[in-house]
Image: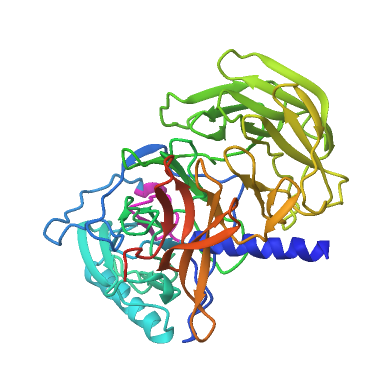
Amino acid sequence: MVQMKRLQAFALLLAGTLLLTGCVPAASTGTPPSGSGGNQQPESQAPPGSTTPGTTPNSSSGHPPTPSSAEWNPAEIPFDYASMKADVVIRLDEEPVLQSPIRTPVGSGPQTFTLFFRQAMDRSSVVEAIESRIKEKASAEEWFIEPDLEFRWVHDKQLHLRATPRTRVQPEDGIKEYVLDVKGARTASGHVLSEPPGFLAVVLAPNQLWKVSLDGKVREQISGYPGSYHSDSFLDPEQRYLLLRRYTEYCECDARHPLLYGIYDRQTNELTRYPVELTTSYRGEGAFVADRRGFFYAAPQEGQNMPVSETAVPVEIGEFVHGADFSHDRKKLIMAVGPKDREQNLDLLLLNLETGEKQRLTGALKGFVPIDEMYGDVIPISFDDDGRQFTFAMRQSRSSFDQLRYRYDWKTEKVSAWNPPVPRDAWAGYTQTDDGMYQMYWNAGLFKGKEHLMDFQGEGLWLPNSHRYLFARHKENAEGHAVAMDIMAFDADQRKTDTLITDLSFGISFIGASADGQWLYLLSSGDLQPR
């Protein structure tokens, strides 16, 4: 029974991940199954750090304004042609690190690419090759599409291309993609390119951030992401910053491809890209950066240019960190420390980020470090702090899923046993009301202390300064396919569930709620305006 609960919880987590990525079941018309793009690769890289202004969408469709053909006059991009190994490099302009050969998600609006050739090319043969390959794939596979193409040659070695899908690709359409391939094109000297690397563009409606009133009457799209970025929740209590991730590769598999990372500022509508992995819980060497907006990254290597941030605090503790999180007030770091190869019985270290003062509880983390159940990797020990206490868990043994659970009381400064109403071999993750009266456990449901009030209802959040838990409920059509979602509210005091908003686009994800409880922030690849 306990094993079944863990499997059911994994299925719920997987479903939540698919909702977050905007993936939907494949249509029954022969489209391939949609995938998540792979899983996170710990040692991933991203483009050089820069700040890119966000774009304001010109309608509720979620697409930023696009210049007309007359306005689209791209300039030459400096490039080291002499170092090229392949005949061509095809690069997505929005994220220059995404280059051929690749199969990667792109937005559903117009996309611009730059093609760099090792040799001077016969221009007409390049255009003919690209167009013929697109037609060939679209004729052979029904999920391939023919976008409208525009070409701008800078010179015989550099071509700018804009591809615009002829119809808006919606989340329910499943996978649509097109290929950019110059196979068969000729150089100016007459050499035919036989096996050049191609670029497979998987067209996905980008997830966008929406602000929706609690009664659903006001719905405003506030982001204009051109590509498919994903996020979990706001980093900060002020609901200003989001940590965004983007898949570099797309596949219907569990491969762990590198991710691209950035921080989105809701107030300025800007996306700041980082050239390193960003995490909300840290595990790694003792030299790292804690950005008090709510994220971590390893100390930059020589030559890595990091965005300037007044909230970034360099940390150097001289020992390996098996897990680090911020305290509730962001003034301290809560860390599990010890030798890198130690798997059990670690020290608890509290670091004051303002004074540098340290408090160590030697051997306080009794048990073994947690292991990822799918891949077998060691994962960070995480600490969940509510300002009164923080909770954490270790494993009973190296091969066991059973947890040893603890709580640290900030007043007594003591560690004691923590006994949540969750099976020992299931994850004890939870979210709770601001006053700590009610908890929603992923693997047990909603509780008031030890009293069970409701089974787990899926991804959701507690409305600030209330005892109302909000969650989304699927609506199915006659064939049993999920076609829409309703937002429900469970009043824990009254033991009553009400419907707040109906018929939202399938695949919404809760990102946060305003402090006054009047607004919800949702992530969706669909249009949330009333139908």
Q: Decide whether the magenta segment is chiefly helix, strand or loop.
A: loop
Q: Which residues are magenta?
A: 81-100
Which quarter of the image is occupied by the C terminus?
bottom left
Q: Nearer the viewer, residue 194 or 444?
A: 444
- Is residue 346 shown left or right of residue 466? right
Total numbered labels placed on residues in the image: 0
Q: Is residue 270 above or below residue 412?
A: below
Q: Nearer the viewer, residue 321 or 58?
A: 58
Q: Is residue 91 magenta?
A: yes
**The image quarter in which residue 378 lies:** top right
Residue 54 at x, y = what percent?
A: 30, 46
Q: Is residue 284 above or below residue 355?
A: below
- Residue drawn at 50 percent across, 71 percent down: 24
Furthest-left residue in this view:
70
- Is residue 331 shown left or right of residue 81? right
Q: Nearer the viewer, residue 170 or 192?
A: 170
Residue 130 at x, y = what percent?
A: 31, 72
- Residue drawn at 35 percent across, 71 percent down: 169
Residue 464 at x, y = what percent?
A: 50, 42
Residue 177 at x, y = what percent?
A: 40, 72
- Is any atom of residue 130 visible in this view? yes
**The image quarter in which residue 500 lies:** bottom left
Q: Coloured how?
A: rainbow
Which quarter of the image is occupied by the N terminus?
bottom right
- Is residue 130 shown left or right of residue 198? left
- Is any atom of residue 102 visible in this view? no
- Residue drawn at 72 percent across, 45 percent down: 449
Q: Is residue 323 magenta?
A: no
